[in-house]
Amino acid sequence: MMLIEYQSQRVSLWYFRLALVLFILQVIIGLWLSINYAFTLPQELVNIFPFSTAREIHTNTLVAWMLLGFMGGTYYILPPECGRELYSPKIAYAQLIIFVAAAVTAVVGFLFGWTRGKPLLEIPFPLNALIVVAALLFIANVAMTIIQSKEKSALQWMLLGGVTFLAVMYLFGMPFYKNLNTDYYYWWWVIHLWVEGAWEVVTASIVAYIIMRVTGVDRKVVEKWLYVETGLFLFTGIVGTGHHYYWIGAPDYWLWWGGVFSALEPLPIVLMVVDTWMHVRERKNPIVNPLTWYYIVGLAIYHLVGAGLWGFMHTLPPINYYTHGSQITVSHGHLAFFGAYALLNLTIFYFAMPRLKGINKYNDRLGRWGFWIMTIAMFLLGLVFGIAGILQTYLERFLDIGYSTAHLTMMFWFRVAFGVGLVFLAGVIITVYHLFTIKQSNLPAPEPVVTPAANI
């Protein structure tokens, strides 16, 4: 028995599986990074596997598994949304092979020092070129599927716009510029406009589709909020990039323009939370698998707290002047990425993977354990990093104590972070195991209401 409407949706399964493997790898390397902070390691060990290499692997596996989830999710929702098969499943598989080959080669290359050294964009140019090829194949496949579909919807075009924006922004991080300030100016175009622009548009589109399918809420309601949220994400995100420019020698006015618009960035996230509760009230379907809804609500709340409120407080100019680059940034980054994108991918996986296996109603007991362990542990991890960051800011930037001396007082908190990280890893392993071995529940489930695409 298959619960998918189109056979080409099956291409997404390998994207999901590989993403989950990289998720585990990312968390394991993150634990190693916390050990580096929490303990004084022998120099011989540091020489073999230095902190910089581990950080490269940690951040780049994060980007890789996020993108694999976005791509797989797009390939899953596009056929039913367009009312036709994917333009080319072969292109989708070729794209996956190219992308994964580039990602694996990059990780191995980091171990041997093959890196550009550009923070978060360390992948060497030849591998970057392969990733661009994979991105172009992805855009072409999505575009042709939408263009050849008989039914058109706002969600389709929003999704195409998001993935195109995502690929275009990546290009600005590929070249090196002779002037370091110029180089970091465009570096922020990738780092900030990816997560505050392109990724947000893709997130809004995918969540909108899943909400319609899970709740049966009217498409017009969802698309109305989709327009508002996407417009606000782009409006606040693009100008809000300016709050980073103070640190690269850009004119002073960017500090305030960026600060003001960064203050507005939580607004679309608040609307997303409100939107989620509206769907709960207006739903036409019973929630067949409550765990998927847990992830949707968790995504909205974490997004608001981690990316919105915590990011807003941290990036206010008078505060960021002292906290920039401290462990407070690490706290914000972990809460924001987990809330906005890790939970998004896991929402996609729990929505799609059972259906790809022909499972309508699944036993979610193990999955609920994984959800609560991960979400609670990540909250505690963000709190611990935040405490360490406040301590760091006070000692280094108010009392003018040297980094090494200040770090000695922070090591206790990093040991706590390592312990919490172990708990988080347990939640990740439980979740991944559940997704790979998910089984049909014995309880019958009602058929959901399908909301068709609206012609325009």
Image: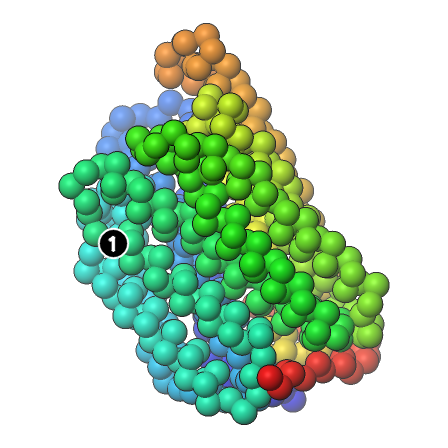
Residue 430 placement (x, y as % from top left) = 61, 55
Question: On the picture, is 117 further left or further right than 423?
Answer: left
Question: On the picture, is 448 further left or further right than 132?
Answer: right
- Is there any visible trace of residue 306 in the rendered image? no
Asked which quadrant contains residue 242, the reply is top left
Which quarter shows the C terminus? bottom right
Q: How many marks?
A: 1
Residue at the image position 23 percent from the left and 63 percent from the top: 129
Few, some or many C-alpha atoms within 10 Å of disc 1 (few <14, some 14-19, many ≥20)?
Answer: many
| Closest to the observer, 47 or 118 | 118
- Is there any visible trace of residue 230 in the rendered image? yes
Asked which quadrant contains residue 87, the reply is bottom left
> Can you say whether 448 is above or below 6 in the image?
above
> Can you say whether 437 is above or below 232 in the image?
below
Query: Tag 1, which secondary structure?
Result: loop
Residue 304 placement (x, y as % from top left) = 64, 45
Residue 448 placement (x, y as % from top left) = 76, 80
| Closest to the observer, 24 or 400 | 400
Residue at the image position 65 percent from the left and 89 percent from the top: 1
Residue ID for mark 1: 174
Question: On the picture, is 382 further left or further right than 218?
Answer: left
Three-letter amino acid code at disc 1?
Answer: Met
Residue at the image position 52 percent from the left and 70 percent from the top: 158
| Closest to the observer, 40 or 155 | 155
Residue 454 placement (x, y as % from top left) = 65, 83
Asked which quadrant contains residue 100, the reply is bottom left
Residue at the image position 38 percent from the left and 16 percent from the top: 403
> Can you say whether 347 is above or below 149 in the image?
above
Question: On the picture, is 268 further left or further right than 191?
Answer: right
What's the image's color scheme?
rainbow
